[in-house]
Amino acid sequence: MGMKLSLAGASTAIALLLSNQAFAQTAEVMHYWTSGSEAAAIKVIADDVAKKGGTWKDSPVTGYEAARAAVLSRLAGGDAPTSMVVDLGEIKPLVEQGVLAPIDNIASTKGWQTFLPKLVVDKASVDGHLYAVPIDIGTANWMWYSTKVLDDVGVKPPATWDEFFAAADKIKAKGYIPLAFGGQAWQEALVFRSIMIATGGNKFYTDVYTKHDVDAAGGPLMVKSFETFGKLRGYVDDGNTNRNWNDATNMVITGKAAMQIMGDWAKGEFQAAKMTPGKEYGCELAPGTNGVLNIVSDTFVFPVGEKPEQVAARKLLVDVMIDPETQVAFNSIKGALPPRLDVNLKDADICTQKAVGLLKDPNALAPNAELSFSSETVGAIKDLVTQFWSNPSMTPANAAKQYADIVARN
């Protein structure tokens, strides 16, 4: 009797294992990585899934906001993908809505806190359970520049905003566009955050974004930040409205513009154009932000569902995405840093080398908006920055007051 039960149990286990292997063949993944370099980067993960016996079903949606809306629609309609890419700051709200499955019950995640930054592990966890696989750590405060344009004008990469405006006047007089700019709310907010760090250092930035200090949010440093941001209007071209970030990057690649303030994902576009950092293009942290990384992080999360095929596909994806070789290969193309601190980056390019040391210093990390505020507050801040950019009649003092009002409501 006992032998029969044991054999039956073994047969069931073997059948389940075989069926799970079949189930794991297809994993649908939704993401917003549609530029040339981003598509090449995510293909690294898809190829590694294939090597493990799975099949990657790619479901890209162009644009972060459009992708977010599509994901929410799929979740609401009961047609969730196997996995989806979300910002690290979006995890907790989604968990609270009951739409994400934890992964610590299917993956060996106990040691993750030893090789991932504490900030990342904390934000990927809710009530002691891990819900996401961090795939990259992006740094948003970079200045990319055309070495050819700067050499032609005879200026050096600016290290401060005063130096930037002095160089920009000369660049403009020479017939180039000083700053490649994408007039979209998230891009405007990205540039503004870099200016905040440059204006008051990481202390001012974290007073606003981490401590939610209303006085700091409406004080003189915020006023000065808006003054600097407003001054940039005179150094962009008229066609910047609603321009995609990668199109702005292409302006630097083709020598139409001298510089761009954009996250490290822009590096992937230069790489796709067969350009080498330190030769055809250069990279420095945005003016005035040296020593600080304004970090963002993309993560893969997994909608709820306990069908065997869902669990099997989920485990396959987690195992591939956390693999150190996969993370290095993915980020070498995308331009970001692997969130794993235990990977070997000695052969990384000069841009990565400028940031990798800072990543290990908690005092050098300035969290992105999505890691600090509710989605409603993040949206309100973006709207305010866009309104100020689009309306030169709004004074920096008025903008700072409205910023403080938003923080007070958070």
Image (cartoon, helix red, strand yellow):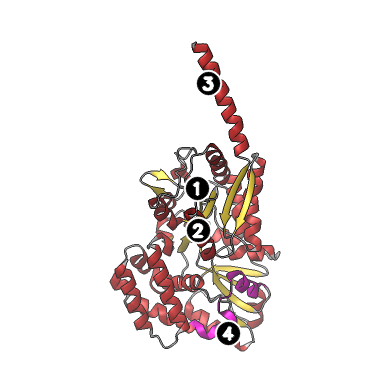
User: Residue 329: x, y in percent?
Assistant: 62, 51
Image quarter of the C terminus: bottom left
Judged from this view, the residue extending furthest toward the front is 77
Look at the numbered disc 2 and give the secondary structure of its residue.
helix
- Local packing at callout 3 (Cα closer than 10 Å; few below 14, some 14-19, many 20+) is few
27 sits to left or right of 210 = right
From the image, state whether disc 4 or disc 1 is nearer to you.
1
Residue matched to label 2: 73
Residue nearest the observer in this picture, 36 or 343 = 36
| Amino acid found under the numbered disc labelled 3 | Gly
Residue matched to label 4: 238
Spatial distance from mark 2 to mark 3, Cα to Cα? 41 Å
Q: Which residue is located at x 42 percent, y 88 percent?
A: 393
Spatial distance from mark 4 to mark 1, Cα to Cα? 42 Å
User: Residue 184: x, y in percent?
Assistant: 52, 74
Q: Residue 8, located in which quarter of the rendered image?
A: top right
Spatial distance from mark 4 to mark 3, Cα to Cα? 71 Å
249 in the magenta segment: yes
Residue matched to label 3: 9
Q: Give the range drawn in magenta.
A: 232-253
366 sits to left or right of 354 = left
- Of mark 4 and mark 2, the one earlier in the sequence is 2
Spatial distance from mark 2 to mark 1, Cα to Cα? 15 Å
Q: Which residue is located at x 57 percent, y 73 percent?
A: 260
